[in-house]
Amino acid sequence: MKTQTETIPFTGYQKLVVLILALTQFTVILDFMIMSPLGDILMKSMNLKPSAFGVAVSAYAFSAGITGLLTAGFADKFDRKKLLLFFYIGFTAGTVLCGLAHTYTVLLAARIITGLFGGVIGSISLAIITDLFALQQRGRVMGFVQMGFGASQVLGIPIGLYLAAHWGWEVPFFLTAGLAGLIVLAIMVKLKPVTAHLAVQRDKSAFLHLWHTVSKPDYRIGFAATALMSIGGFMMMPFGSAFAINNLGVTNHQLPILFMVSGLSSLVIMPLVGRLSDKISKFKLFAIASTWTMVMCVLYTNLSVTPFYLVVIFNVLLMMGVLSRMVPQQALISAVPDMEDRGSFMSINASLQQIAGGVAAAAAGMIVVQKTKFSPLEHYNTVGYVIVAISIFSILMLSRVSKLIDRKMKDKAPVIQKDEVIISEGM
């Protein structure tokens, strides 16, 4: 049996799957993340208040959450490859519509459509990862797949901001949609069907399957842990660029550099954290990263006009904490559901994540105030203090998840050992 410190190598096909899923995550995250750096441009060009922009950001999250709940009962009824293709094609079409929007109302509608499809992709990817990779591999897989977050900041966001500044804010959406179209072809040609879960599926009714998933107490603990972390993670995001420009003194020319440096740090941090989470306690790593995030949140949100190099350093340090929480948390949550419930569990989990993120973005929009288009944001530090309080509860909740998984692994150990004895006797 493999110990916690032993590394299970990837097969060639597993590496290909990681690459495809990382690319899908790159485009989905870029589509969502680009709203933050474009925030200042959109707020000025469409004459939006922070509350209105917060609604535009949260619209994606709420629609994604609703879709996840609606599809959760069906998530384990189909080949996961087909599900991924269906929703990813819909996401691509929604991103094109975002680029075609010219009024706030149309943009809001386009973000809702994009969320209806894009919000489910992450849960399908997690279900595929859980089906194809052992728990001792998932930290590394999550680290590589979540590199899409860093890659979107290194490549997507700086390029998107450059294109937006020269040819209009719509262009980044068209660029994302074009790349997504190529990835659709890769999924169709290279990804094999993922159907092992169909053999152990017991619930004939999609509604009953959804109800059985929601009704399990252990699963509800996982859902609560995800929701709490998502609220804390989303609150600062929508107004990040507006705060940097109007409060910290970052210029529009420096903003792409800020995102690029943060993204480069992410590309280094994520694989390292992934490997580390496969070697040490995932919960301890999460707790340390959360504590670091709390400290950096309070420090960063209380800054005023600051030299650019210091803004970059603080941004990287903040990103270290935020990203280092994501990998161990997702790896732990992936171990909560049984195989026959994974699709449904991941869909509900992603829905709660999106809905919690939407609540966070809307709440931040109500907390943050900007008197004029060019005046500093007010009460952004209050958002930082709220994140600290939520992060404390996140640590407590994930400790319950960790204990739950430890108990689950111990219950499975005797069965594994018995099977090994039977095999050895038959040799």
Image (cartoon, grey):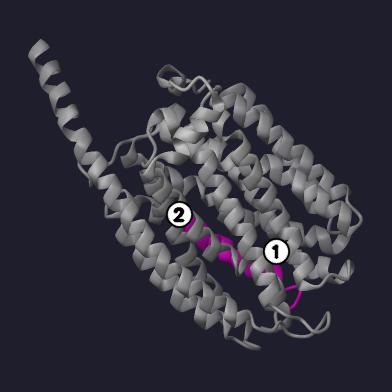
Q: In this rendering, would 180 be left or right of 320?
A: right
Q: Quadrant of the C terminus?
A: top left
Q: Position of residue 89 (x, y in %)?
A: 71, 33
Crowding near pointer 1: few (<14 within 10 Å), some, many (20+)? many
Q: Residue at x 63, y 37 (%)?
A: 70
Q: Of the residues shown, which amino acid type is indicated by label 1?
A: Ser
Residue bearing mark 1: 36
Q: Percent from the top left, x then y, of residue 426?
A: 11, 11
Whole-number angstrom distance, CA of label 1 to CA of label 2: 26 Å
- Judging by the rendered image, the residue that carries numbered circle 2 is 224
- Closer-to-camera residue (305/307): 305
Instruction: Pinpoint residue 201: horizontal percent, then vertical percent.
Output: 44, 21
Query: Toward the viewer: 244 or 124?
Result: 124
Residue located farthest toward the right when viewing the structure as drawn: 102
Instruction: Identify whether 15 is placed above or below 205.
Output: below
Q: Residue sitting at 46 percent across and 56 percent down?
A: 326
* In the image, residue 162 lies in the stretch drawn in magenta: no
**Residue at 84% from the left image edge and 70% from the top image edge:** 48
Name the image quarter holding the N terminus: top left
Q: Is residue 17 visible?
A: no
Observer-side mark, 1 or 2, equals: 2
Residue 423: image quadrant is: top left
Look at the image and tell me whether residue 226 can be seen: yes
Q: Which residues are magenta?
A: 251-269
**Viewer-nearest residue: 285 or 404:** 404
Reading the chain from its start, which is encountered first: label 1 or label 2?
Answer: 1
User: Looking at the picture, which amino acid does disc 2 mark?
Assistant: Ala
Q: As drawn, which residue projects farthest toward the top?
A: 426
